[in-house]
Each structure stands twice: as structure tokens, then as C-alpha cells.
Image (tube, rainbow, N blue to C red):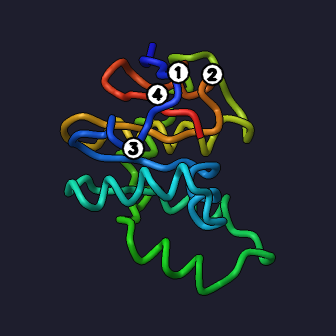
């Protein structure tokens, strides 16, 4: 079970990798002040910000401003969904007793987070599902 966190201020991200799920990415693109502060803190402390290629697909919204989309995406590392990552996501779903499209992208995001080195923080709009899918090494931050 992953550690759940309360509201994390940007000063609480001290090192490691910061992963964004769809909600986290969408808020960043929309200019949410709290998420923007966390991303700026990450950049200023050499914390790599990562998203899955599937997160890009899930967050795509034709009503979002394209220049802002491009700016945010240019400042993150986009992690491809490889066969080993897919196998890990399938194993996470199997272990949690979950299946289907409702959990598929969450499982890939969880596997992406768990594949990162060092301390890993995940900004997510779905704390409950991510707590089921992620191991205790991933610190969950509500979006």
C-alpha cells in the first residue's frame, strides 16, 4: 500500500522524481497555481518531472491552449510504454484484482512511477486507486 499524503507544499519535494498522472498534467497545463509551484520547485531542485505517453493521450483536450500544452510537455520527460512496463502494469492489475479500461492507464502510470529511481512522488487525482496499485516507495500527492 502506498503512503498517502496530505496537502504537500512545494517545499516538501526535496529530491527524486515527480510523476504526474492525467489530473496533475491537466492542472499544470491549465496553469493551476499549486501544481505550477510544485513543478517550479522540482525544476529548481533538479527533481525530474515524468509523464507516461499514455498520460499525454489521456490529458489531450482540444480546448486546451496548444502553446501552453507544448510549453509544459517540453519541460517534462515523457516515458514510453515498453513491453516490460506493460508487463509490470498487468502484474499490478492482477495483484490488485483489477481489470478493464477503468484501471488500465492508472496501472501504466503506477508502473511508470515504480520504475523510477530514488524517491518517487506521484501527483494524482485518484489517490485511492493509486494507493492500491503503487508500492510504499511511491509518495502520493493529491492533485
Q: Is residue 29 left or right of residue 44?
A: right
Kindly check if marks 2 and 1 are in contact, taking CB atoms under 8 A apart as contact: yes
Percent x, y for residue 15? Answer: 21, 42
* Secondary structure state at the residue bearing disc 2: helix
Q: Earlier in the sequence, mark 2 or mark 4?
A: 4
Q: Nearer the viewer, mark 1 or mark 3?
A: 3
- Ranked by sequence position, the earlier of labels 3 and 4 is 3
Under circle 3, the secondary element is: helix
Mark-to-mark CA distance, 2 and 4: 18 Å
How far apart, in angstroms, are the residues tagged by discs 1 and 3?
21 Å
Residue toward you, 30 or 135: 30
Q: CA distance from mark 3 to mark 4?
A: 32 Å
Other residues around mark 3 within 10 Å, as few (<14) / some (14–19) / many (≥20): some
List x then y, in percent, for residue 6. 51, 22
Q: Quadrant of residue 113?
A: top left
Q: Quadrant of residue 103?
A: top right
Q: Nearer the viewer, mark 4 or mark 1?
A: 1
Q: CA distance from mark 4 to mark 1?
A: 15 Å
User: Tag 4: Cα neighbours inside 10 Å, few (<14), some, or many (≥20)?
Assistant: some
Label 1: state its secondary structure.
helix
**Residue 91: mark:** 4
| Left or right: 84 as drawn, with respect to 45 | right
Which numbered dot is residue 10? 3
User: Which residue lies under the disc numbered 2?
Assistant: 128
- The residue labelled by disc 1 is 131
Which residue: 73% across, 41% down? Answer: 101
- For the residues labelled 3 and 2, say whether their Cβ atoms are less than 8 Å apart: no
Which residue is drawn at the image coordinates 62% and 57% (left, top)?
32
On the image, the x and y values in percent for residue 91 come to 46, 28
Picture quarter containing residue 98?
top right
Q: Is residue 65 above or below residue 132?
A: below
Q: Are marks 2 and 4 in contact (CB under 8 Å)?
A: no
Amino acid at each position: 500500500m502506498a503512503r498517502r499524503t496530505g496537502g504537500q507544499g512545494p517545499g516538501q519535494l526535496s529530491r527524486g522524481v515527480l510523476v504526474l498522472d492525467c489530473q496533475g498534467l491537466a492542472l499544470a497545463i491549465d496553469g493551476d497555481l499549486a501544481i505550477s509551484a510544485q513543478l517550479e520547485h522540482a525544476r529548481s531542485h533538479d527533481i525530474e518531472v515524468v509523464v507516461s505517453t499514455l498520460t499525454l493521450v489521456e490529458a489531450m483536450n482540444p480546448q486546451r491552449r496548444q502553446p501552453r500544452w507544448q510549453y509544459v510537455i517540453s519541460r517534462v520527460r515523457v516515458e514510453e510504454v515498453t513491453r516490460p512496463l506493460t508487463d509490470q502494469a498487468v502484474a499490478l492489475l492482477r495483484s490488485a484484482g483489477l481489470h478493464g479500461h477503468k484501471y488500465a492507464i492508472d496501472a501504466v502510470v503506477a508502473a511508470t512511477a515504480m520504475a523510477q529511481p530514488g524517491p518517487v512522488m506521484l501527483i494524482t487525482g485518484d489517490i485511492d486507486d493509486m494507493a492500491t496499485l503503487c508500492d510504499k516507495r511511491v509518495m502520493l500527492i493529491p492533485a
